[in-house]
Structures are given as C-alpha cells and as structure tokens.
Amino acid sequence: MAERAAAEIARQVGRISEERGIAHLALSGGTTPRRTYELLAGSSAELQGVEIWFADERCVAPEDEQSNYRLLAESLLVPAGVAPERVHRMEGELGPDEGARRYAEALCDGVSRRDGQLPVLDLIVLGIGPDGHVASLFPGSPALDAADDAVCLGVRDSPKPPPERITLSLAVLRAAQRCLLLATGSSKADAIDAMLGEPTRHVPASLLRRERLSVIVDDAAAPRGSRP
C-alpha cells in the first residue's frame, strides 16, 4: 500500500509541477501514511516544485509528539530536504480559532481560488478513521455544516484526544483536484465499506467527491467484495 501510494503521489505532483511550475499538496498525519511519507522522501526530485500544506493539525506545539507537523518533518520534510519556505504548517499552538483563521488566510493567499472563493489544492492525502472521519471532520460534527465558502475550521470537541484541532473544511476537500485516501488494517474495513455506500454525514469520508477520489488499501482494509 505504502509503495503504491508513494509512487502515485510522486507521479501526480511531479506531473503538475512540470506542467505548471508548482503543485499544491496537502498531507495528513496519523499512523497509516507514515510509511508512505518515508518512501516518498526518496522521490525528492518530484517534490522540488511542490508546496506542502496540511489537511489538519492538533492544537499542540510543533515539537509535541502528537503534532502532525512533527510526524511530517521526521518522515518526509527533513529526509527529502524540502525547503522550509515551501512548508505551510497549521499553527496549532495558536488554538483552534486563531489557528484556523490564519491558515485560511494563508491558503487563500497562496493557492489559486475557484470562482474567487475556495482555494483549489492539487492533491490532498487523507487517512480514514474506524468511524469514517477524514482530516478532523468527525461523524455528526457541526464542522460538516460549515458554509460552502468556509476554508479552514477550528474544532473544539474532537472525540479523539486532543479535543482542539484545526481542519480543512469539507468544501475545500471537495474542491481539490484530487484526493487520495489511504487505509490499512482490519479496523478500517468497515469504514471503507461505509465510505463506499450512500453519502451520509455519519461517515464524513462518504461525502468526498468520488469522481475525484482514489483509494489505496491493503488486503485487510479492502471492501469485503474485493478481498482475496
């Protein structure tokens, strides 16, 4: 899974940066994508024209062990030699509201916007929780009801610790040119099945735009009908 995912990310951002001179890639934290990032670090040539953004962040300091930035720095950014000025981290230490406000401004200033509103990221890499959440958009969360022009949201009631987080909005995830969702392990199998079912706010991953979504899973997380 990690090898295929790393190759797919490198292929897509490499093609876009070659065509346009720049590609905008948003990454998620969590245990699932870490090996993908470690392998992607070996594709440093394809990352030269890439601006790195984040799908979500915990409201902790960047050096905290729970920080998505720290995971990305250790597994990808430092090994690949990505220039600091091309890394746009969410400032979780500012708290959910100010951190989200600042990140929305950065995205709107740094990424081309569709119809003058939402920034359009080229590729967003996402994990999925056993409950079907993506980024820090959890089942039934008020964040799922944010306005269509919302860019970045503060979260105060995450069911997973820490409770305070910053996340890209569902509208930004849906506006992206492409989303790549990764899943490993049998604990994710039910979530993948639910994601492929009818769209529902009880399974946030099911609300992604499927015509712009690629899913890479290992055998244990595969939909029941496709398992060997």
Image (cartoon, rainbow, N blue to C red):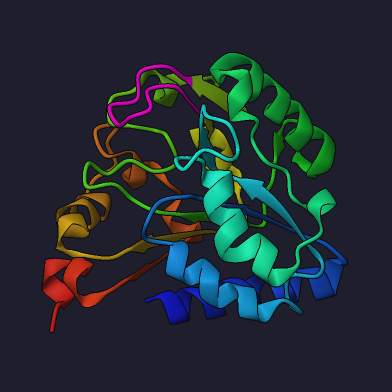
Q: Residue 147: horizontal and vertical position, in percent?
A: 54, 20
Quadrant where the image shows the N terminus:
bottom left
Residue 165 appears left or right of 54: left
Q: Quadrant of residue 113?
A: top right
Residue at the spot 85% in from the left edge and 66% down from the top edge: 20
214 over 113 or under it: above or below: below
Can you see residue 106?
Answer: yes
| Magenta residue check for 102 | no
Q: Residue 117: horizontal and vertical position, in percent?
A: 73, 30
Could you say which is closer to the camera, residue 68 or residue 11?
68
Residue 136 appears left or right of 41: left
Q: Magenta-highlighted stretch: main secondary structure? A: loop
Could you say which is closer to the camera, residue 145 or residue 187?
187
Can you see residue 115?
Answer: no
Number of dots carrying numbers: 0
131 over 125 or under it: above or below: above
Residue 192 appears left or right of 205: left
Q: Residue 36: horizontal and vertical position, in percent?
A: 48, 70
Quadrant where the image shows the C terminus:
bottom left
Residue at the spot 21% in from the left edge and 66% down from the top edge: 221
Residue at the spot 50% in from the left edge and 50% down from the top edge: 28
| Magenta residue check for 161 | yes
Q: Residue furthest bottom?
A: 228
Q: Quadrant of residue 183?
A: bottom left
Q: Residue 176: horizontal and vertical position, in percent?
A: 60, 50
Residue stretch rendered in magenta on the structure: 155-165
Could you say which is closer to the camera, residue 117 or residue 17?
17
